[in-house]
Amino acid sequence: MDKKISFKEVPSECPECGGNMVYRGVGEYSCEKCGHLMYDDYGKVRNYIEQHPGATQSEVALATGVSQSRIKQLLIEERIEVAPGSTVFMHCALCNAEIRSGMYCEACAKKVKMGEDKVNKVVRQQQKKAGYLSSDPYDAKGRRRYERQ
Ligand SMILES: [Zn+2]
Ligand SMILES: [Zn+2]
């Protein structure tokens, strides 16, 4: 048996004939013997969104049996893009703009990235001030910093 894929939702045995399910890509599996098609969570959600581009997250969850949090996870991991023309599906975590994948809209993604850089800079400065980044174990008065009498 080919056990390369280790997702727990992966179908391994054909429910029709008991044959081996072989991965065909994009979350789709087919039976070696009878050609029966099956899908993992990703395949189910992806298929449903493709066929029902206007579906909401809860409709997809209901139709596929995949939990909403799992769907959200799949969307955030950007393995699934919401089809163009889809009704509201994902929202930017900052400005609530409609987005098709990920966590932020393009503008906010940029802001977040810049913000992170800024925060990192401030943190680095603070660490430098506190002496964490200095290789010199002595402070200005020549005492060992981490030794307390
Ligand atoms: Zn089969
Ligand atoms: Zn935004």
Image: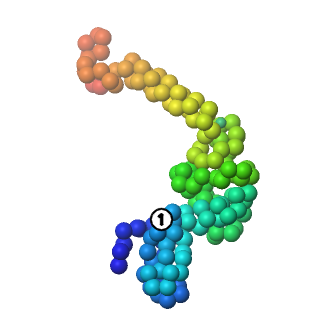
Give me the residue at 53% from left, 81% from top. Answer: 36
Q: Which residue is mark 1?
A: 25
Can you tell which quarter of the image residue 135 is in? top left
Tell which of 102 and 120 is nearer to you: 102
Q: Position of residue 39 (x, y in %)?
A: 54, 71
Q: Quadrant of the N terminus?
A: bottom left
In front of the other: 67 or 123: 67
Q: Is residue 105 above or below residue 121?
A: below
- Which quarter of the rendering shows the C terminus? top left
* Above or below, comparing residue 48 to residue 105 in the picture: below
Q: Identify the residue at horizontal 53%, vertical 27% (top origin).
A: 114
The answer to whether one can see residue 79 in this image is yes
In the picture provided, is 142 more to the left or to the right than 47? left
Colouring convention used in this rendered image of the protein:
rainbow
- Residue at point 48%, 27% (across, down): 117
Q: Eyeballing the image, is 58 above or below 36?
A: above
Q: Quadrant of ligand 2?
A: top right
| Residue name at image x 34 percent, y 25 percent | 132
Residue 46 x, y percent position in the rendering: 59, 61
- Of helix, strand and loop, which one carries label 1? strand
Q: Amino acid at mark 1?
A: Gly
Q: Position of residue 19 (x, y in %)?
A: 44, 85
Task: Judge whether 81 appears above or below 39 on screen.
Answer: above
Residue 66 or residue 30, whichever sits in front: 30
Answer whether residue 149 is visible to the viewer in this image: no
Q: Crowding near pointer 1: few (<14 within 10 Å), some, many (20+)? A: few
